[in-house]
Amino acid sequence: MRLKIVVCLLAVLAAAPTHAAPVSVRVDPARGFDPRVDYASLLAFGPWDDRNYDLTLEDLAVLAPDEAENREAIPAFFRVRMRQARPELRKSGPAQYPRHAYVIFRQMFGGYLVDDVLYPTAARDGARWVFDRETGVRVDDPAAATAFVTGEVRVTSPNGAAESAIKVSPADPDRVIAGTNGPLGGQRMHYSTNGGTTWTQVNLPLGGTSGDPAVDWSSDGANAYTTTLGNCSFFGCQVWFYRSNDFGATWTGLESATPGDPRREIATSSADKEYLHVDKHATSPYKDRVYVTWHNNNVMQFAVSADRGNTFASQTFSNNSAELGIGSDIASGKNGEVWYFWPAFNSRTIRMRKSTNGGQTFGTSIVVASTQGAFTFPLPSFDARQAFLYVAADADLSSGTYGGSVYAAWTDATAPTTSNPSTNHGRVQVAYSRDGGGSWTVTTPHPTADALTVDRYHPWLAVGADGVVHVVYYDTSRSADRTRVDLFYAYSTDGAQTWSVPQRVTSVQSPNINDGFEWGDYNGLDIVLQNLIAIYTDNRDESGGTAQSVDVYAIGIPPGGASPGAGTVPDGDAIAGAPLTVDRSGGDVALSWSAACGLATDYAVYEGQLGVPNSLVSRLCSTGGATTATITPNQDAAYYLVVPLNAGNEGSYGRDGLGNERAPAATACATQQIAACSAP
């Protein structure tokens, strides 16, 4: 019966004259993963997609008995994955799939993949689905890439949004979450399934939010988190915490513990300017603890959760006048250390407290640096709300030369400030510590010779897995009257001792808009692997005129500091060739890569644990020369490395961000011998 249906469908497909340049689908059983599956029969379940070849007989068991009657334009593999993720979906009658299922499919996968060509849409022609040949784009064409975002993308709509935070999933860089203050009042959440290229805006449940967003992920990427100020009144605000179990699409994850209650009220009054951090390092004894900072009447506060945000324990720091502040941030280390930073405005200092027991207790405060500014100060581009002294912090979790270093960045003035914007000058400062926070050195990540003619402010800092330190900030160097800004980027490969020449990353200059809020208080930055993304307030007029349009944009930035060399995995940018890709194949992972340069005749495959240096173990010491392999993972949060082989020797394991050769695995498949690449 199945064969009869398939033959009929293929025959109709070949006879279709009604659709412009129709594409004929030829299902090849040999490409299927499971020989028990009649893959051609899946044509009855929506438009064809080559990702159907990964389905097993067990996968197909989740489909409804009347699946072929569900006429949604979503292919079989997507139906299976959605039903596996949501077993509560109906298996009979109407409305078995969400009305949004097709939109979700398009957002996640970009279209239908057929013979290495991606078709954005499919059209029904009688009993079958057809593709328009003219719309297809080969997946090796940059236009079809689903890689991490490059360039600027508007996140918010309509206009009227500022103050933003962003985080990339540590398990899947295609998934990105963001929070913004506005538009239309309150806090708005945003999620992307394609590395920040496109965004979907959603609201937090129950309403009553007021902004000051912060976001982060659990170490496995299963949970997304956000905090917001809420229920604000003359008595101040509360701090609310939410969890998402579906990558930011909805924020009701905590209802699994408290039905009907999707949030936690961490602070109930007088709160302001909260921030959020999750310890994600694999070796930390406190991995996945959630840390939240804020202040009550300028007395610094702290909360920690050991159960992914279900419950929190809070504590209050000193109310001594020299310690009062606003604008805190947290970083954590490989051994679970917690560093809590904030600017203390009365004493004009950047301060830090450290915990070595997962935030249960903290040591006395240490002065990181003194500041010229106190709380805010006016600049020509920021004369109403004024530039805000806040701290952005991160730690180097790598095993490189500067591994274990802790960093903090903030805005400061070049001299004591006045109430006259034209006499003040903004600069960005970065401090680093090599001894766990005991002592600090301050550097400047931009030129200083033009300090009296250029303002820099609103920095955010992130440290890559290779130890490279990245900073973004506003810069007025292209504005003679210092009223317009661009977003600039700088990086350091020597632990923030010296910095690259800063580069402008925005294409359009943003004017000051004197609306009382101007740029808000802060921007955001995150990096996972080599995926660097910033989020910021942008006042450009999208129509090219002079209209006022305050929006939040995200921008993908090619990270500096990476040194490609022998064995570097091609990324389609600096080095030609297909990248090493990892796809699901039932319970296994399917690896695919391009041929190595030089005389490689075979390949070894290694598996390591994300975040754990020197954890590589061999999984295959030979692929028989093939550039594909299927492996059953030995652990969660794994990564894979393919090493070329020739004449009984292994080649390079690639180079780290500082250009140094990575060491071979402790139990390598063969003796390493690195040779220069040469044409085959």
Image (cartoon, rainbow, N blue to C red):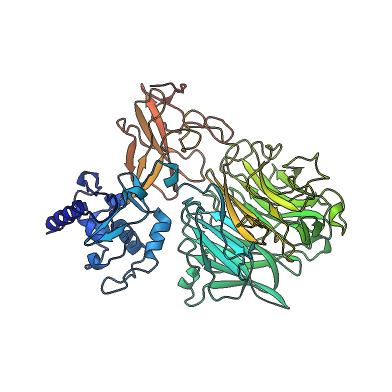
The C terminus is located in which quarter?
top left
Residue 132 visible here: yes
Going by the image, does 242 lie left or right of 638?
Answer: right
Give whichever of 135, 414 is nearer the camera.
135
Q: Is residue 10 above or below residue 263?
A: above
Going by the image, does 278 lie left or right of 74?
Answer: right
Give whichever of 608, 452 is nearer the camera.
452
Residue 599 picture location, percent across and down: 38, 22
Q: Is residue 13 above or below residue 67?
A: above
Going by the image, does 544 lie left or right of 344?
Answer: left
Residue 212 picture location, percent across and down: 65, 65
Q: Which residue occupies 28% across, 57% down?
A: 47
Residue 404 visible here: no
Q: Which residue occupies 44% across, 45% down?
A: 143
Report the number of numbered marks: 0
Splitting the image into 4 quarters, where does residue 400 fall?
A: top right
Going by the image, does 549 lie left or right of 364?
Answer: left
Q: Is residue 4 above or below residue 558?
A: below
Residue 356 picture location, percent across and down: 64, 53
Q: Which residue occupies 68% across, 50% down?
A: 509
Splitting the image into 4 quarters, where does residue 375 fall?
A: bottom right
The N terminus is located in which quarter?
bottom left
Residue 567 picture location, percent across and down: 46, 30
